[in-house]
Amino acid sequence: MRPIITLTTDWRKADFYVGTIKGALLCKCARAEIIDISHQISPFSVYEAGFILRNAFHYFPEGTIHIVGVNTEIKNARYIAAKYQGHYFISADNGIFSLLGEEDNLEAVQIDKWQRKSSFPELDIFTHVAAHLAEGNALQELGPRTESFGQVSALRPIFDEFSITGQVIYVDSFKNAITNITKSLFTKLVQQQKFEIRIQRNIFDISQIRASYADVPPGEVAALFNSLNLLEIAINGGNAEQLLGLEKNATVRVKFG
């Protein structure tokens, strides 16, 4: 099977960066299949990159190599290559590894085989590392093992016997607001009780979970658990971010009991 290399960046396709990296990768490993996960990460947002990558990488075959080109120009940057759940990840040590999952299960090295020569470490270092791994070479050949990583704190909901208070952690391209309230937490606490989902100073209350966006008429608000099993607030055919004020970090509260 051809080696697969994915790209997750905040570069935007209008710039030359994406094309440069793809060209360099193909020069170093002509057999590689290069797949874009996203180039629409908010600038420098490691948390957003971690959210997208954590929820996407499972769907690729084991052995896939994931390049993360987000916030790589940090002071005194270390560059890390890691193996996690059969996948390889290449990134600056900017907190991304703390968002992938269980750090204890990460096998990681600090890259010292190639050094940064410019303001473009993805080109100077990451393409070489990806080609090295794509050709079946060992992770351990890239540098010394490391067990410490930069940290980004994941946003977690707060709850008690009467409520769950969460936040919007991501707004997708359809302007649907995805929260950090999981289906398992909601089910465990709410059980069979009546509930209200309160949005932004309680202007909007929702008292029913829908199975799909189409379960409400066009222009109406719907709450549902998406494919990630996270509570999502949407407007059928509309813009929940704008019309409900549900920007990233906005509060969403579930009241029950």
Image (spheres, rainbow, N blue to C red):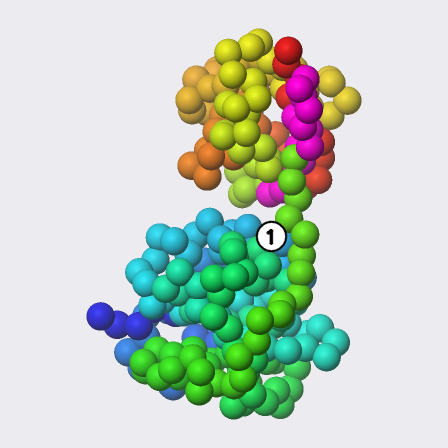
For residue 60, say whether it is visible. Answer: yes
219 displayed left or right of 153: left
Please check the rendered image and state whether residue 138 is part of the magenta-colored stretch, yes or no: no
Residue 20 position (above or below residue 195): below
Residue 41: which quarter of the image? Answer: bottom right
What is the magenta range?
158-170
Q: Quick check: 38 left or right of 29?
A: right
Majority secondary structure of magenta residues = strand
Q: Which residue is mark 1?
A: 48
Asked if the stretch drawn in magenta spans residue 167, the answer is yes
Between 123 and 218, the residue placed more toward the observer is 123
Q: Is residue 14 visible?
A: no
* Residue at x 50% of width, y 23% of height: 187
Quadrant (top left, top right, bottom left, bottom right) of the N terminus = bottom left
Q: Quadrant of residue 2?
A: bottom left
User: Considering the numbered disc 1 on the image, is that residue within a helix, a strand or a loop?
Assistant: helix
Question: Picture coordinates of residue 245 (x, y %)?
Answer: 71, 31
